[in-house]
Amino acid sequence: MRFRVLGPVSLSPRTPSAAKPRALLATLLVQAGEVVPVHSLIDELWGTEPPRTATTTLQVYVSQLRKVLAGDGSAGRAGELLTRAPGYLLTVSDQEFDLPCFERLRTEGRTAYQEGDFGRASRLLHEALALWTGQALSGIPHGVRLESAAIRLDELRMEVLEQRIVADLRLGRHQELAGELLALANEHPLRETLHGHLMVALYRTGRGSDALRVYGRLRHSLVEELGVEPGPGMSRLHERVLRRDPSLDWQPPRNARGTNPDEGGRGAGTPGSQGAARSATGTADGPRPVPAPPSTLPAPPPGFVGRHEELAYGERALRGGAGRQPVRILAVSGPAGVGKTALALQLAHRTADLFPDGQLLIGLRGPDGRPLSSSQAGAALLRRLTDDVSGSPLTDPEELTDRLRRAVHGRRMLLVLDDAASEHQIRPLLQSGAAGAVILTGRRPVAALDGAQHLRLDAVRPQEAVELLLAAGGERMAQDPVAVAEIARLCGCFPLALRVAAAALTARPHTTPAALAGRLHDERTRLGVLREGGLDLRATLLTGYQEAGPPVRRAFRLLSLAPALDFTGWTAAALLGTGQAEAEETTEELVRAQLLEARTDGQAVRYGFHSLLRVLATELREAEPDGARTRRDAVERLGRAYVTLAGCADRQLAPGRAWRAYADAADPSLDAPAIVGASPLGWFREEATGLVETVRRTHAEGLWPLVWQLAGSAAGYFHARAAWEEWEETHELALDAARRAGSVEAEAAIQYSLGDLAWQRREAARALRCYTAAQHTFELVRDRVGAARCRIGVADVLLGQNLLEPAARRYGRALALCSAGGDLRGEVAALNGLALVNLRRGRAETAVRQLAQCGRAAEQLGDRRWTEYVRRATARLTADALRRPSPAANAVEVRPGMWLIGTATPTLTSAGAA
C-alpha cells in the first residue's frame, strides 16, 4: 500500500516528516476523489484562528506533497494532487490505498456471511483487519474533520472485528477465540457484544463458571460507570448459562457453506440471530426471529453542510472515550430556523451503532405548533414503544413515568426529543430510566437537567453559509461567487434564511444571484423576499416572539432601537424606561427565548440581535399604531442616558473641560460613576459608535438640545483619539440643531469645539474663523469663561504661526478672565501657552516658573494628564542637553500629546497620547 490511514498516516516511499503536511495528506485521503475547499483545509490545520500566512503556507505544503507523490514516477498511476476550485482534489488508486481495500473486503465479508458462507466471510474479514496497523489516522494532530473521521473508522474496525468473531463462532472456533476475546473484553470493559461472544466461547470450552464471572464483571462496570444494567440480550444469555441451556452448545448450521477443512472450519453454528448483537439469543432448533428494534428517525436531511465542530462535539459527548464517560442527555438549543433538528438527526444517524435497541424521534409540539403536555408527550413515546397503549394521554404523572420505565427497562435506546418547550414537559420522559441517551432540542436551553451537556447553535460561519448556498442553489450560484457571498451576509449566515434564498433562486430561473442579493439589500422588504413555497422565514422567527409574554414582546420591539450592534444593561434600561435591574431581567428572558444574544468578554455582558431578528423587531415596532411616538420617547430617554454617562466620563478624562453644564439633560436614575468605571477612555471606546448614532437619531427626531449636548460631551474623547470624522459629523449636526433651536450660546460652544477640530487638523484659517465667531457670541452673552477659552484657541494658532507677541497678549488676557471666572482648566492652558511663548523667546527660567504655576493649577484641577505633561516639559527644560541647542530642541510638546516641530514655520502633529 502506498497510502495508509488505518493506523499511522503514511505515504510510500517517503512520508512527509512534519506533522502539518501529514495532516494535510490525511485530510485529502479521507476525502479522496472529492474537492476539499481551501478554507476547510485551513480550518483543519490551524483551527479557528489561522495565521495570516495560512493560505501561502498551505500552498507550500501542497507543493511538498506533489513532489512526494511524483517522487517515484507513479503519480499519474497511483495518486495525483490537482487544483480544483475552490480547493484541491486528490485522486488515488483504490489498489494502492488501504481504506478502499478495507471497505471492499468488509462489504464482501458481510455478503458472504449473509449467504451462509462463514468460512469465506471469516477469511475476508481477517484480511480486512490485517490492513490495520494501529488507531486510525494516528501520529498527526487532529482537527474537527480528522477527529470525526478517526472515530468513524475505529468504530468500523470494531464492527468488522465483531462480525469476524461471530463468523468464527459459527465455524466452531471457540477454543481459539477465548484468549482473543478475553483481551478484547479487558480492552473494552463496557462493550456488551464482545462480552457476550466471550461468554459463549468460554461456555463451549467447558468454562461455564468463567462465563458467569464475565457477566458479573460487565454488570459491575456498567452499574458503576453508567448507572445502567446490561441489556436484555445479555440478561437472557446469563440466564441460559445458569440453566445450561442446550441451545448454547455448538452445532453445525444447516445449509451453510464453508465448513470443509480447506476453508479452515470444523463446522458452524452459534445460537442466535446472524447479527453480532444477537449472537447468543437463539434456541436449540435454530435462530429465533428477533423483531427489528423500533426506529422512527427520518433520513438525514439532504444538503446538510458544515457544523463540523458541533457534530464532533456532539459525537464525542455521546460516544465518550479519551477518559470521558458518555453523556445521557445532549441538549441542543438555538433560535428557530438555526438547524437544531437537522443537527440532531445527523448525530442520531452517526451514533446509531451505540443504540441497538432502537432510535426514536418524538416531536413535542402538536399540529398547531403548540407544545404538547407532559402526558401527551409520554403517551406519544409509549405508542412508539408498545402495542397496548391507547392514544389518550395518561393523567397521572406517576403512572405515566412508571409505564415508561417498564417499557424501556434495560433497552439501550436513543430518544430524540424535538422542540421541547420546558423542563416540566420533558421531565417524565427523562425519568423513565432508559439505558441509553437523549438528544433534546429546543429554542430555550433547559438548564435544570442533571448531567446534561449543552450545545448552543448560532448562525453558521461565512464559508459554511456559502457552501450551503452552493449545495442548495445549483449551478447558478456557483457562477457568481461574489453575489453568493453577499447573499450569505445579508441572510446573516442563518441556515433557514440561506435555504429559503436558494429555493427562491431555484423557483425563478430568470433571476440571477446578483439580482437576489439586490432585493435582499432593503431591510424593509428582506423578510418578504425570504419566503418561498412552504418556507417562510418571518413566520418561523415569529414563533419565539409569539410565545413570549407582553413585557418581553415590548422589549423585543424597543431594543431594536439600540444604536450599536451590541449594548449593555443601561442601554436596555433607557430604551425600556425601567430600572437597570428590571431591564437586565427582561433582556435575559429575551436571551432564553432565543430572541436576543448575550456576549461577554470575560468582564461585562453585552447583548445584541441577530441581523434578521433585528429586522423583524424593527418591522413589528414600526407597525404599532403609536410607533413614531414610542420611537421618539425611547430615543429621548437613550439620549439623556448618553449625556449623563458621557458627561461623567468626560469629567474623568479632562476635568473642567466642559464649563457649560447641561443639568436638564441628566438622568438621575443612572449610577454614572459605577457604569463608566475607572477607565473613561475604555467606556468611550465601547460606546462611541452608539453615541454617534444617537446624535444622528436625536437630530432626526428634532430633539435639538440633546443633539448639541451629546456632541459636546463627546468632544474631549474625539480630541484625545483624533477621531476627526466623528467629531466633524456630530458637531455639524449639533450646529444645525443649535441654529434651529435659536440657541446662540449652544452655537458658540459648538463653534469653539469646531475651532479645536480645525486646529488639530492644522487648518489654521478655519480655526481662527471658528474661534473668533464663538468669542464674539460669548462676549455678547457675557460668558467670560467661553470668551477666554476662545482667546486661548486663537493664541494657540498664532503661536503655531510663530507670532509670539499677539499670542502672548491673548494668553495674558485669557489668564486674567479665567482667574476671575474660577476656570482652573483655562488657567492651566493659558499658563502653558505663556510658558511656550517665553521658551520661544529664549526665557527658559520664566518658562519654568510659569510651568510650575501651570502644574499647581493642574494638580488642583485633578487632571493627571496635564500634571504629567508639566512634569515632562519641566524636566526637558532643565536638562543639560537643552542648554546646548540642537535641531531636536526645536520640537516642543505644547499640550499633552501635541507637539510643535521646528522654529521658523512650526507645524502641529499628534503624538497619539490619550
Image: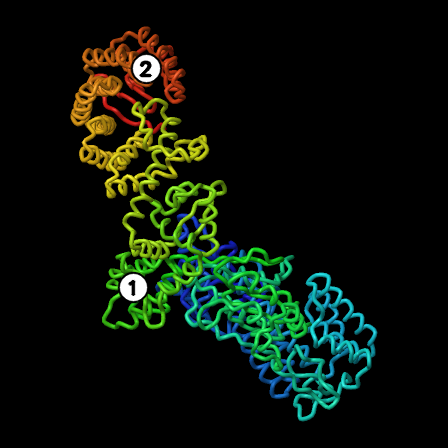
Position above or below: 92 against 320: below
Count up the numbered dots: 2
Horizontal placement of 891 versus 281: left or right?
Answer: left
* x and y percentages locating residue 637 in the rendered image: 34, 40
* x and y percentages locating residue 614 in the rendered image: 35, 54
- Give the alpha-carbon distance from disc 1 to disc 2, as whole Å: 61 Å
Name the secondary structure under disc 2: loop
Horizontal placement of 880 versus 114: left or right?
Answer: left
Quarter of the image for residue 769 reads top left
Name the secondary structure under disc 1: helix
Between 4 and 802, the one lying in front of the other is 802
In the rendered view of the protein, which quadrant contains the N terminus?
Answer: bottom right
Residue sitting at 23 percent across and 40 percent down? 702
Q: Is residue 84 in view from this perspective?
A: no
Position above or below: 742 against 598: above
Q: Which residue is mark 2?
A: 822
Between 266 and 186, the one lying in front of the other is 186
Q: Amino acid at mark 2?
A: Gly
Tag on residue 528? Answer: 1
Is the residue marked by circle 1 packed among few (<14), some (14-19), or many (20+) residues within 10 Å? some
* x and y percentages locating residue 560 in the rendered image: 35, 50
Q: How is the image coloured?
A: rainbow
Between 172 and 787, the one lying in front of the other is 787
Is the residue marked by circle 2 packed among few (<14), some (14-19), or many (20+) residues within 10 Å? few
Horizontal placement of 39 versus 452: left or right?
Answer: left
Q: Amino acid at mark 1?
A: Gly
